[in-house]
Structure formats: C-alpha cells, structure tokens
C-alpha cells in the first residue's frame, strides 16, 4: 500500500474517532445543556428539599427555564437554601412567585416548579422567592395515611 | 527448606528485575517521544497498522455489545415498566465501563500481540542490534512511533466503540423491541453527564492505552530472542494487559465514581 493510501486511511480513522467523541458529547450526554450557562441567580428557602440535587431542573409550566446551582444549609433559619440560575430569557418572574419541589414520576428525580405570582415587580439577580413548598417525603405521606386509616377505623368501631 | 527459600528469593528478585527493566524501558521510550514532531510519518504508518486495522473488530463488537445490552436491559427494565430508561442503561454501561475496558481487551488481542511479535522477531533476527550498529536509535525509530500509535488509537477506538454500541442499542431497543425512539435519546441525555461519565470514560481509555502500549512494547523488547521466547512474550502481552486493564479499571472506577 502506498504511503498516500495509508495516510488517507489514518485520516479517516482519526476523523471517525473524533466524530464518535463528538456524538458522545452532543447526542449521548447533556453537554448541549451547558450552552445556556449564564442568566440570573435567585434563591429560595425550603423546610425540606427531599432528594433535590445540584443541577436539577427548574421549570415553569413544565418548561425548563433554569437549573439548581447550589444547595446549602441556612444555620439561622434551620432551612435549606437552594440557589438556582434562571436563563436570561425568563426575566419576568413576579417577586411573589411560588417555588415547589416536585418529583418527576413516582420514583424520578426531583425538580423545582415555579408558579408565577401576580406582582408587577420581577425577580432580579440575587432575589429571593419567599413562597415555597417543600418536597413531599414518601414516608411522611404513608405515615399520615396510616394514621388517618387507623383513626378512621377506630371511629367506625365506636 | 533453605532450597525452597532460595528459589523464592530468586523468583522475587527476577520479578523486581523485570519490573525495573520495564520502568527503565518506559523512561527511555518517554525520552524518545519527540519523534512525533520530528518524523510524524513513522507514527502515521503505525497508526494504520495499530488503529485502522483494529477498526473492524471494534466496530463489530461495539455494535453487538450494544445490541445485547439493549436486549438484556429491556428484559429487566420492562418488568418495572421502565423500558424508557433503556437508553440510559445502555449509554451509561458503555461510556463508563464497557467501552474503555472491552476496547482495551480487544486491543490487547488484536494490536498488542502483533506489536510484541513484531518487535520480538526484530530482536530475534537482530534487526534492533543492526540499527544500533548503523547509529540509528531503535527506541526512537521502532519503539516510540508504536507507543504513540497505541496511545493515540485507544481513546479514539473506545469512543467509536461506545458510539457504535449506542447505535446498536438503538437498533435493537427502538427497532426490534419497540421502545420509543424519542425517549431513548432524551432519557439518555438527561442522565449521562459529559464531565462525570463521558470524560471519565475517555480518561480511562487514555490510561488503558498507555498501559497496553507499554506492556506490548516491553514484552517484545524484553523477549528471549528465540521463536519460543517470542511466542511466550506474545501470550504474556495479552494476559498481562488484560489483568492490568481490569485492575486499573477497578481502581479508576473507585476514584472516579464515588
């Protein structure tokens, strides 16, 4: 085989390898989501964040508008402080918006859903969402259901 | 009693001597790595025999591994009604583990053994000494280009393996088993992290490439210059590379995915 053929084949090989890497980056992994870095950061305090993780999605009406960028424990309020970065395209969130932690599906990952409020003033960089709703912890719900079931059964016996 | 102790000691010394020779060999090779700048043609020719010619087996086994993963994953996942997570299962197992490890094992069998045999035979027919006689440094002319070729090929081959495997999984999962194509990709993208998973897989394959190249070249260079010696060295290359890759994979996985 001539040197030229060999070099062309090696060129194809390297190109294939790089194309595979590119595919792994773009099609298989979530690298494309990193392109929307930036935006403004707001924080919210929750009594219980359940299994919320950094980089979990922040959604409004089910549409992803940002990402959780930090979770810390607030020593003074005994609450969790969640920092989230919201894309600059969504800079019209009213200050009295409501943030809740939901679970995608029964056992899926947890995310923050924001419901817009009614104020004219909008959230800015460093703003804080005051109205929050904690994550539902499955054990607590089961506990409550059990309690209501047993008390209900007791009433029936009386 | 003393005789047994002596044999044990001789064996231990032999192991340490070989380890020492191996590391000296590695240092010498690293000293000659500038060859890629000075004579890139040599590296390209080796890339052909090491990388391009391994492409077929890598593509075929990547496709089949991906397809089998999809089959097995589907059977387990569909029981929990989570067949949509098939893309995640296939992609994570390929990118994190199977891609780098299986590629390294195949590479040891396909390219590593060939490198060892080639260099061992060069030594047996005294071509290496002949080069030294002509004031050509065999480390620079023979070893370093092959080292570069193996080292560069491995990450590319592993990436091709994973990419082709994901396609194979798509073919079986979506084409044959009827998983929704959109959720195959979107669930995959939602759970596979570029830095955590893809990058760590690439780092693994780079480490495996280094080890595979080192073992194959050293076994050839250190082979007893007889036909039996070369045959033994070739066997050792495959066995030692496989063991080293598996051990290294365990350590790297422990470090990366805590």
Image (cartoon, coloured by chain):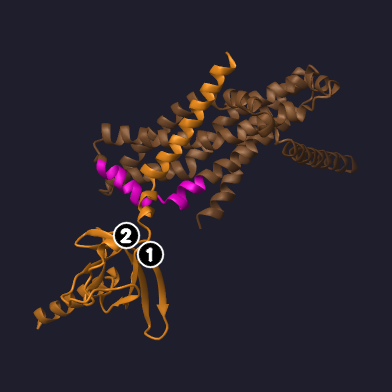
Chain colours: A orange, B brown
Q: Is residue B148 left or right of residue B101?
A: right
**Chain for mark 1?**
A
Looking at the rendered structure, whether the residues under marks 2 and 1 are on a common chain is answered as yes
Q: Residue at x 47, y 36 (%)?
A: A18
Q: Residue at x 11, y 81 (%)?
A: A155
| Local SS, label 2 | loop
- Give the camera-side residue of B220 and A144: B220
**Residue matched to label 1:** A53
**Residue B68 badge:** none
Q: Quadrant of the N terminus of chain A?
A: top right
- Residue A98: image x %, image y %? 22, 73
Q: Residue at x 19, y 70 (%)?
A: A116
- Residue B162: image x %, image y %? 44, 37
Q: Which residue range is magenta in the image?
A: B182-201
Whether residue A10 is situated above or below residue B25 in the rendered picture: above
From the image, give the main secondary structure of the stretch colored magenta: helix
Q: Residue furthest bottom?
A: A76
**Chain for mark 2?**
A
**Does residue A106 appear anywhere in the picture?**
no
Whether residue B141 is situated above or below residue A82 in the rendered picture: above
User: Could you tell me if the residues under marks 2 and 1 are in contact, i.e. CB atoms within 8 Å?
Assistant: yes
Q: Quadrant of the C terminus of chain A?
A: bottom left
- Residue B254: image x %, image y %? 55, 53
The total number of labels drawn is: 2
- Give the camera-side residue of A88 and B211: A88
| Local SS, label 1 | loop
Q: Is residue B172 left or right of residue A21?
A: left
**Residue matched to label 2:** A109
Q: CA distance from mark 2 to mark 1?
A: 9 Å
């Amino acid at each position: 085989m001539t040197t030229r053929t060999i070099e062309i084949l090696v060129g194809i090989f390297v190109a294939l390898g790089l194309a595979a890497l590119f595919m792994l980056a773009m099609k298989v992994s979530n690298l494309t989501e990193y392109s929307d870095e930036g935006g403004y950061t707001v924080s919210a305090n929750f009594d219980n964040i359940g299994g919320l993780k950094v980089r979990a999605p922040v959604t409004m009406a089910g549409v992803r508008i940002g990402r959780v960028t930090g979770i810390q424990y607030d020593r003074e309020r005994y609450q969790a402080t969640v920092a989230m970065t919201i894309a600059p395209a969504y800079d019209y969130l009213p200050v009295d918006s409501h943030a809740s932690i939901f679970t995608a599906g029964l056992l899926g990952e947890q995310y923050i859903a924001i419901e817009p409020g009614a104020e004219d003033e909008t959230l800015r960089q460093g703003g804080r969402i005051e109205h929050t709703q904690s994550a539902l912890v499955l054990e607590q719900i089961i506990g409550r259901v059990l309690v209501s079931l047993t008390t209900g059964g007791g009433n029936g016996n009386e | 009693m003393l005789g047994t102790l002596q044999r044990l000691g001789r064996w231990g010394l032999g192991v340490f001597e070989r380890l020492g020779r191996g590391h000296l060999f590695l240092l010498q090779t690293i000293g000659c790595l500038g060859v890629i700048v000075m004579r890139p043609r040599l590296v390209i020719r080796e890339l052909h025999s090491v990388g391009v010619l391994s492409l077929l087996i890598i593509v075929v086994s990547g496709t089949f591994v991906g397809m089998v993963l999809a089959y097995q994953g589907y059977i387990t996942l569909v029981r929990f009604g989570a067949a949509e997570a098939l893309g995640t299962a296939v992609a994570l197992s390929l990118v994190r583990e199977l891609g780098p490890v299986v590629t390294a094992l195949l590479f040891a069998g396909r390219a590593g053994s060939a490198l060892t045999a080639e260099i061992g035979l060069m030594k047996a027919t005294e071509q290496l000494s002949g080069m030294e006689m002509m004031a050509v440094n065999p480390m620079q002319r023979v070893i370093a280009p092959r080292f570069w070729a193996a080292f560069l090929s491995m990450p590319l081959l592993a990436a091709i393996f994973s990419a082709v495997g994901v396609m194979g999984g798509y073919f079986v999962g979506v084409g044959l088993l009827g998983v929704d194509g959109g959720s195959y990709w979107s669930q995959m993208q939602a759970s596979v992290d570029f830095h955590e998973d893809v990058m760590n897989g690439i780092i693994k394959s780079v480490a495996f490439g280094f080890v595979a190249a080192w073992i194959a070249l050293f076994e050839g260079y250190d082979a007893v210059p007889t036909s039996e010696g070369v045959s033994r060295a070739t066997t050792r290359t495959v066995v030692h590379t496989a063991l080293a890759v598996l051990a290294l994979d365990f350590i790297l996985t422990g470090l990366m995915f805590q």
